[in-house]
Image (cartoon, rainbow, N blue to C red):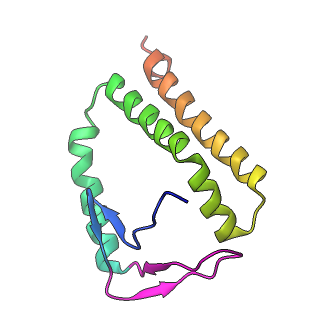
Amino acid sequence: MTYTLTGKHLIAGDWVAGETTFQSEPAHGPANTFPVGTPALVDQAAKAAEDAFWTFGYATREERAKLLNTIADEIDARGDEITEIGTQETGLPEARLQGERGRTVGQLRLFASHILDGAYLDRR
């Protein structure tokens, strides 16, 4: 696996470690250490999301679609690693997780397309 879990939360572009951690109990493969989410970290993340709204909330349709397509591209680029981690954590078969990943990427691209075509605006 080339992707390395950080064991931290990503909040507003910064990797944040919690004070308390827990060890995962995967179905197979190595256990990982993760920080416990606290009310303070949730509050920090919620405030960061609110701050992001004031820029992204007013972004153009093209910018929004680009973000969704970029997320889909990044999921595709890390597909094997995501599947490997997912099978370890859940014990689900690889084919099932590949299907779920494909559905997710397909939905992201569909939403991006929908944003770009503007039909949802229903201007009359």
Question: In percent of the image, x 37 and y 71: which residue is there?
Answer: 8
Which image quarter is the N terminus in? bottom right
Rendering quarter of residue 89: bottom right
Q: How many marks?
A: 0
Q: Left or right: 80 with respect to 122?
A: right
Task: Look at the magenta stretch and give its main secondary structure.
Answer: loop
Q: Nearer the viewer, residue 18 or 46?
A: 18
For the question of whether residue 118 can be seen, the reply is: no
Q: Nearer the viewer, residue 9 or 52?
A: 9
Question: In percent of the image, x 48 and y 58: which residue is there?
Answer: 3
- Residue 34 percent location from the top left of the image: 45, 78
For the magenta stretch, what is the residue range? 18-37
Q: Residue furthest top?
A: 124
Rendering quarter of residue 31: bottom right
Question: In percent of the image, x 33 and y 81: which residue is there?
Answer: 18
For the question of whether residue 91 can be seen, the reply is: yes
- Residue 74 percent location from the top left of the image: 46, 42
Q: Left or right: 86 with respect to 75?
A: right
Which image quarter is the C terminus in? top left
Q: Is residue 84 magenta?
A: no
Q: Residue furthest front?
A: 2
- Residue 5 percent location from the top left of the image: 45, 67
**Eyeballing the image, is 20 above or below 7?**
below
Q: Left or right: 39 with respect to 112?
A: left
**Eyeballing the image, is 102 above or below 46?**
above
